[in-house]
Amino acid sequence: MQTRHTNQGFNFDKYPTFEKDIDPKQRAWIEVKGKAIETNVRNLRAKLSKNCQFMAVVKADGYGHDAKVVSDYAIKGGASQLGVATLKEGIKLRSSGVKEPILVLGNLYTKRDLIISFKNDLMPTISSIRECLICNNIGKHYGLKFSLHLKVDTGMSRLGFESDKFVQQFKKIKSFENISIKGIYSHLSSADEDNSLAPQSSTQSQRLKFQELLKQINVDRNHNIKIHLANSAGMLLHKDFHFHMVRVGLSMYGYSPLAKMDKNLSLEPALFLKVKVAFIRTIDQGVRVSYGGKFVSSRKTKLAVLSIGYADGVPRNLSGKINVIHDNKFYSQVGSITMDQMMVDITGSNEIKVGSTMLLLGSEGDKTISPTDWAYQSNTIPWEILCSFKNRLPRVQID
Ligand SMILES: *Cc1c(COP(=O)(O)O)cnc(C)c1O
């Protein structure tokens, strides 16, 4: 039965009921600036020769940014292929209307998965004759060619044909009539380390090994086969790593994998992690804050309780080590980060209110906090920080 409640001019019935009606900016959320991705791709592409293609790596839901949004803007910026890690990620992109070639970087090894991959027009990464045979049989069954990329291991010891057997095996693979080799690639293990360009580095020896194999199988004349080796770091190191295509993740999102950043390249972070102040309290001197009482106030302290915690993907071991930004000022996070909330010392601020928005990652005014800062503080890498953000954080596109 409909009843009409009114109280001080409030019309209670006009308030929504459903999950979809919740404001995505009600608690904590990630804002994604698609234009930044587009600009980064354009600036990165300017480093490549005209014929070198740009594969936008959008695995792990576009490094936490939303794979569909990232793909659309990367394509606008000039990306011509997409890379995903899993079959599911690939299918999701295809069914969202992406038309560009999609390479699945992870290994698909069952007939079932390879058939699904074929039917969705996804290119699998192939690391063995056995997988090649399955693809060839699938192609034959449909009277078509199954497009795929071959991977060679040159020093990562992860996926890929063994480099010293590849030349022999490639002869056999060439005889398969129902596959179409669209690419041959390898992956660098250490391009982001200091001195990776030094002549004796493992990065250089991976490149040389790869080039030697390519020479032996004589693929340079076959222009349908894309040769690719570089991730972001490899791409930024030197042109020698570019070949026919680069596979770029981290730097497209606006972060450099290299300690020494190219001054002529500007990258703009696309991600902003924001949170609402849910509560404010003032505590006396000598009062314990959060689990374990690891922080004890040294003076009368005003605390803001923020609605975000480790269940949203903020690493718990950043407790007491990070700042948040409000109105171009830094405030320190204090006490243990809890599952869903964390506390910030806002003593002295009169502007911060319940419902105010604070910035955990991104730039505001002249202040910036980057996933690289968090990674450094929590002894990990920015890649892991970015893909730790959970689905509980709505992704909001902001162009
Ligand atoms: C993730 C990934 C990349 C992208 O790496 P970035 O360092 O983020 O640029 C490239 N190639 C492969 C095979 C990958 O798995």
Image (cartoon, rainbow, N blue to C red):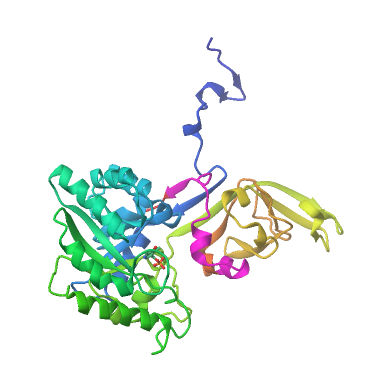
Whether residue 305 sits left or right of residue 31 in the image: it is right
Give the quadrant of ligand 1: bottom left
Q: In which quarter of the image is residue 41?
A: bottom left
Residue at figure coordinates x 82%, y 60% from the top left: 297
Confirm whether residue 124 shows in the render.
no
The segment highlighted magenta reads 373-396
Q: Quadrant of residue 130?
A: bottom left
Q: Quadrant of residue 125?
A: bottom left
Relative to 14, is 137 above or below? Answer: below
Q: Nearer the viewer, residue 325 or 96?
A: 96
Residue at figure coordinates x 43%, y 79% from the top left: 261
Relative to 202, is 384 above or below? Answer: above
- For the view shown, which residue lies furthest in the top direction? 1
Residue 273 % position (x, y) = 52, 55
Q: How many marks?
A: 0
The quarter of the picture where the N terminus appears is top right
378 inside magenta stretch: yes
Q: Nearer the viewer, residue 78 or 364?
A: 78
299 inside magenta stretch: no
Whether residue 310 sits left or right of residue 137 in the image: it is right
- For the view shown, which residue lies furthest in the right direction? 286
Whether residue 33 sits left or right of residue 170 in the image: it is right
Residue 322 % position (x, y) = 64, 64
